[in-house]
Image: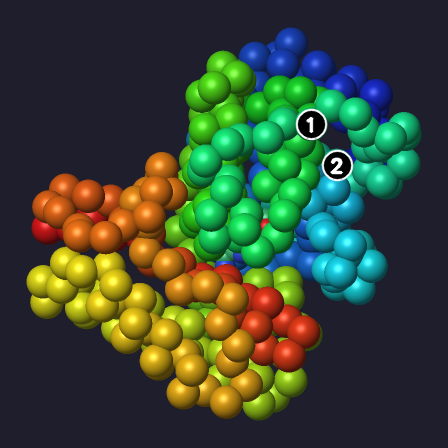
Amino acid sequence: MIQVVATIAEIRERIGQARRMDKRIGFVPTMGYLHAGHLSLVEAARRCSDIVVMSIFVNPLQFGPQEDFSRYPRDFERDRALAESAGVDLLFAPTVEEMYPQKILTTVSVAQVAEPLCGRSRPGHFEGVATVVAKLFHIIQPDFAFFGQKDAQQLAVIQRMVQDLSIPVTIVPCPIVREADGLAMSSRNVYLSAEERKQATVLYRSLERAKHLLAAGERRAAVIRKELKQMIEAEPLAVIDYVEVVHYPSMREATELNKGDQVLVALAVKFGRTRLIDNLISTIQ
Ligand code: AMP
């Protein structure tokens, strides 16, 4: 049976009990409105942990003032049932007041890695993410924590924070889970109208094109960027936020790609008010 816990004191108590029994703790942080992408992280967590802890917390710190914090989709009962059937043991679902009882004065900011791409489009976003993840790591003290490559820059930011601050947790990256037509699963997909949903497959189609270009020997990042932009612009409802090719995980801008380089091709595209991201990580052969 899944146990739902809403306070920091109680989750600490329960985790303390598990630790005293030498259990390995696997942690899956989420903002809820669960889908198969989240559940794949739980599956990965079950493979290497004795106790799987999931958090559901829509973190106001990582949303800008014009963003979708208040309308972000929420359905706790559905999430609880899905988490339970996926094998989550402890579900930590605190309120905003529990996590931030007073104005937060201490934050974690990761320079450079957090600056381009989503960091540029969403000022303060990664500081909000790094701060809440650092706080959750202190509360849960997991042995392993599972993050989706869907949010590749977030993963790079968290990895770097863990290295720089010597946080004793192993970060486990998990592959992107997609719908049958290639659209990356996201809680925000529910915002899309039928027509937007159709056109949104251009993200995956253009990443497939990038994969093909790289496999065919294209080494000029600018050529890849330009071709992907043209493909996306051909969809009338798509508004490009960015199309980037960067070195991964440094997130430094790429120009000429060389053998052995690990590169991230990353997209952020708006359909109406919905901003979608997707990416491809590839090692140059
Ligand atoms: P979120 O609830 O959107 O903050 O996501 C929580 C975790 O699930 C993050 O580590 C995400 O990268 C991961 N995630 C979200 N969507 C997917 C997906 N389609 N495939 C794999 N992981 C995902």
Q: Position of residue 191 (x, y in %)?
A: 68, 74
Looking at the rendered structure, the kind of residue marked 2 is: Phe
**In the picture provided, is 81 more to the left or to the right than 19?**
right
* Vertical order, 60 against 178 (above or below): above
- For the N terminus, which image quadrant? top right
* Vertical order, 274 against 159 (above or below): below
Q: Is residue 93 visible?
A: yes
Q: Choose top left, top right, bottom left or bottom right for residue 197.
A: bottom right
Q: Are marks 2 and 1 in contact (CB under 8 Å)?
A: no
Q: Position of residue 23 (x, y in %)?
A: 57, 19
Q: Choose top left, top right, bottom left or bottom right for residue 59.
A: top right
* Residue indicated by mark 1: 107
Looking at the rendered structure, the kind of residue marked 1 is: Thr
* Residue indicated by mark 2: 92
Mark seen at residue 85: none
In three-dimensional space, the C-alpha distance between marks 2 and 1, rounded to whole angstroms, equals 21 Å
Residue at image position (36%, 37%) is 250
Counting other residues with Cα less than 10 Å from the Cα at mark 1, is it few (<14), some (14-19), or many (20 or more)?
some
Counting other residues with Cα less than 10 Å from the Cα at mark 2, is it few (<14), some (14-19), or many (20 or more)?
many
Q: Position of residue 247 (x, y in %)?
A: 30, 45
